[in-house]
Image (cartoon, rainbow, N blue to C red):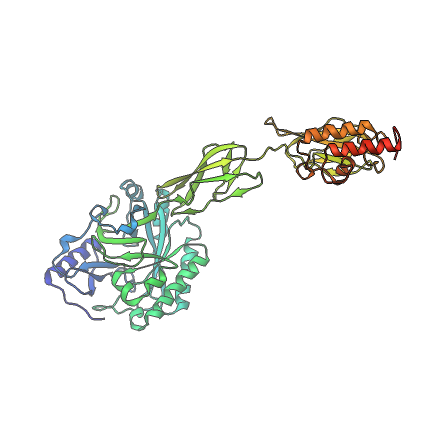
Amino acid sequence: MNIKFIKPAAILAAAVLAVQYLPGFAQKVFVDAETTDTEIVDAIITGYEEDADDPGKFRVITNSDVMSQAVPDASGLTHNSRFDNCIRLNGIDVSKYQESIDWNAVAADGIDFAILRTGYRGYDGGKIVKDYMFDSHIKGALNAGLDVGVYFFTQAITEKEAIEEAQYVINMIKDYDITLPVYFDVEPTEGQGVNGRLNTAKLSISQRTAIAEAFCRTVQDAGYEAGVYSSKNYLLNYLDPDYLSTKYKIWLANYVSQTSYKGDYQMWQYTASGTVKGIPGAVDMNVLYSEKVNFTKDSLRLENPEETIQPELTGDGIVTFESSNPSVATVDAVGNISGISNGTAVITVFSSNGSRDTINVTVDFPPAAVLNYTGMLFSEIGATEIISRSGVQLTSSNSNVVTVSEDGTASAVGRGTAEIIANDGQGNTAVCNVLVTDSEPIKGDCNLDGNVNAIDAVFILNLAANLAVGNAQDINFSDAYLALYDFNNDGVINSFDASDLLVYSAYNGIGYKN
């Protein structure tokens, strides 16, 4: 890569930044230049501490006398309009170079999240090394109530090495509550005195992209969200960010007050010289664009007691749900809504990013007191039939003829007539007329007295009057019960059946027995 010369004032400013960032250590600044005097240059500040193979954390300085434009906090940023519907969360990222952190003070200073370095692969030897402050940092951040994500500084030059790095990170975080992505931190390290193995490998854009994807794919297969961290320059010239952003989160490093990066990204590291209470010296500052939670529909209707609906939901963050009226509708931990009784309720979703949304739920169940039959005939003692679903109170008007169990099973126990009555406890009732014989009934013998006569015609007329329209398809009689009353076999029960029965019985004599 070509190295662009920068003005002495800018070098001095970078040196000051380096000293502020890593007091007590010898530092070097390596410049990866971009194209104009007004843009920002990528740089590496390498801290030589216990392990000279640690490339440290990627830093950025200006390439001209514009250090006064550095943005120390999010108040001076201009955000892309694409994030107008997002919650902006303030965060930091730290590594072993921030040893002493008062995490409660950090949280109290308006920091919402922290991205923590798990480790790195040495830029020379290629050895994977744990960041020795990781366990302390993650426990402190979580105990202070911050959302936490992690990153790994890579020097992987093959997909196999990237997978190894991902598995290393997964093993480190498996016992912690990681709510933000696991990032693949890929940066340049070439410069004065440093030329890392990733640079000397002379990989193509497609190879570097495949390596990043191997890491992210392994992370996502383990159940975590994955992302790629890099500078604007590196994303545009050494990776395929358009492809990566279709599958993974992008964490952009660009130290300006308004980035000109046109690609997709969800988090922006805008300075390395931020100040936060609880952290001595400078710290990286980030803004995370978190989409507000939103139900895609404003309302839903539940009409089936067995139905559960999970409304479509968009947005970011860890979500919880709440029902305004659990006696009408309940909602479980993953957003499944179930109706309990008729009425209305409001379901609210809350995101950990501070946003919320509601959906109006109407429960409109048909009366629970619904029986499978309005008329039923048993032709033998001991026969059974499912008369209703469980959960409805069922009673028999004559338990010497028919009994009914709690699970909705009707049983014929004696010859005669009875009614099964269903009550849903809300004032709704339903009735099934039951006839029980100990042999096949005589067609038209509606009162089961062994005769077909005018008395049976009265039974038919009463039933037809109760049915109003008399359409057998609307009354749900059992076949045997319908055949008993539908004397002329036309599929309906009405006065024609009574008339035909009277003619039949008169022709055959009063009290004719079939």
> Could you tell me residue 455's position as x and y percent?
81, 27
Q: Is residue 234 left or right of residue 340?
A: left
| Of residues 380 and 294, the one drawn nearer to the viewer in this rendering | 380
| Of residues 279 and 9, the one drawn nearer to the viewer in this rendering | 9
- In the displayed structure, 229 sits above or below 478; it is below
> Could you tell me residue 315's position as x and y percent?
38, 47
Residue 366 placement: quadrant = top right
| Of residues 302 and 71, the one drawn nearer to the viewer in this rendering | 302
Quadrant occupied by the N terminus = bottom left
Quadrant occupied by the C terminus = top right
Residue 49 appearing in the image: yes
Q: Is residue 253 left or right of residue 354?
A: left
Residue under the point 59% across and 27% down: 426
Residue 187 placement: quadrant = bottom left
> Could you tell me residue 89's position as x and y percent?
30, 46
Residue 450 appearing in the image: no
> Could you tell me residue 368's position as x and y percent?
61, 33
Question: How many marks are shown on the rendered structure?
Answer: 0
- In the displayed structure, 175 sits above or below 367; it is below
Residue under the point 29% across and 72% down: 200
Residue 379 placement: quadrant = top right
Residue under the point 85% across and 37% down: 439
Q: Is residue 113 left or right of residue 358?
A: left
